[in-house]
Amino acid sequence: MRALALACLLSFLALSGDPALSATPGTDATRQSRPEHPLILVTFANAPGSVPSRAGSTGQHYTGAGGYSIAQSAHRQAQRVATTYSLKEVANWPIRSLSVHCVVYEVPDSRPVANVLAALASDPQITLAQPLQEFHTLTESKPPYNDPLYDMQTNLTALDVPHAHAYSQGEGVRIGLIDTGVDTAHPDLRGRISGSHSFVSNDNTKASSYRHGTAMAGLIAATANNGIGIVGVAPRSQIEVFEACWQLRPDADAAACNTFTLAQALSAALDAKVPLINLSLGGPADPLLSALVQAGLKRGVVFVGAATDTPDAFPTGIPGVITVGSNEHDAGRAMLTAPGTRVMTLRPEAQYDFESGTSVAAAEVTGVVALVLANSPRMSATSIESLLRHTAIRPYSEQIPPSQAVSAGTAVNADAALVKLSEESGRRVASRAAAH
């Protein structure tokens, strides 16, 4: 076994380009550069024992393996095969432990490798004919971001956000966040907050009282590749904060709002002409708030809301609002979904922690919508929701045709949406060019 292991090691090193172990010159085609034509490996029987070398010659042998060298019959076989099958010899070496002579040939024309190997396999003088295969180390590739907590953001992988970032990172998109306040001094939000407005009479303005809003802001827009923290879904978007909710306890994310504070925040967001509004909150149907959202929809504003168990809840009971549930829970009705359990995000005062709930899922999809709007700013809410639905990943258990309405949530895939958007844009350009 030791001799076999050594022979295999020497064979590998010869093909890897160690000049001290290459049996013949001209082995560069088997090293780092890819050959122009496919390579195959052929073996012939090689009689054991050494063939005396000419005086003064180093000979073609491995002194470390007992002087085992190429028998003349094996050498002639190698030349015969090259001529008979129209192959080009690239490298050769004897393997003592297997009593064979190995030759690498190049197939110098367009013949299918399978046909060449079939012909060689029928040759009685050949003991083995196979492709020269390629192998790779199994280390993981370097992640696309230098943010140290990126590896814990399994939500980004589930949403296929890293691939989507090749198309867009939310550049130039303004997002209205109607929530609690946000810790605008958080280092992972530096440069991401374009403004902050409060509609809450609250004596407690400490950053620690802004847990929920800070978490949602981080999910949407935490700065990428700044060497700290996490990566937001739309890390180059801008968030405008409209504080309408207040934290209920110092150590919990739970917060409350009312009709008056939410109406003020919604009105201010519409006046500011923010194109995309995140509502990671829910409550009963409300006539005033519904009227404000409907007014925004008529102006082309896109609203994203967190799903609840109540069909007519605010805001997701309003037709036109993009409703988002959690991947991990049964949606109960047709809706888009995103990761909603233990998702890494920001905490006030430069902290990080996991967050769960449909609030999280809605914030993530708000980020995906920002990626879409960065590429196509005039898309309507209806068109965006249709795009996300058609490119979403349906549950494996769902066995119905795609043309039919789904009865469960469909998981948003950011990369698929951006790819489809890019393809449609390319077709429109080509169509216009053809028309001229």
Image (cartoon, rainbow, N blue to C red):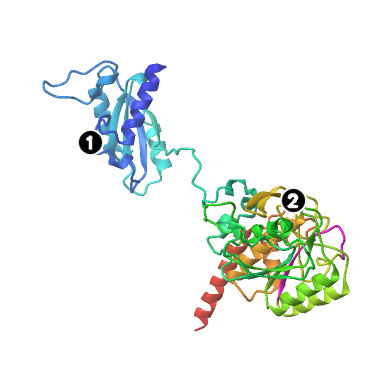
- 88 above or below 97? below
- Residue type beneath disc 1: Pro
Residue with the mark numbered 1? 25
Residue with the mark numbered 2? 356
Residue 63, by quadrant, is top left
Q: What stretch of residues is rendered in magenta?
A: 301-312
- The answer to which of marks 1 and 2 sits earlier in the sequence is 1
Magenta stretch: includes residue 311: yes
Residue at position x 61%, y 51% in the image: 157
Residue 267: where, in percent of width, then height?
76, 77
Query: Please, what secondary structure does the residue beneath circle 2 have?
Result: loop
Query: Badge 2 local density, few (<14 within 10 Å), some, or many (20+)?
Result: some
Mark 1 in CB contact with mark 2 (< 8 angstroms): no
Q: Nearer the viewer, residue 282 or 381?
A: 282
Residue 423: where, in percent of width, then height?
56, 67
- 365 above or below 154? below
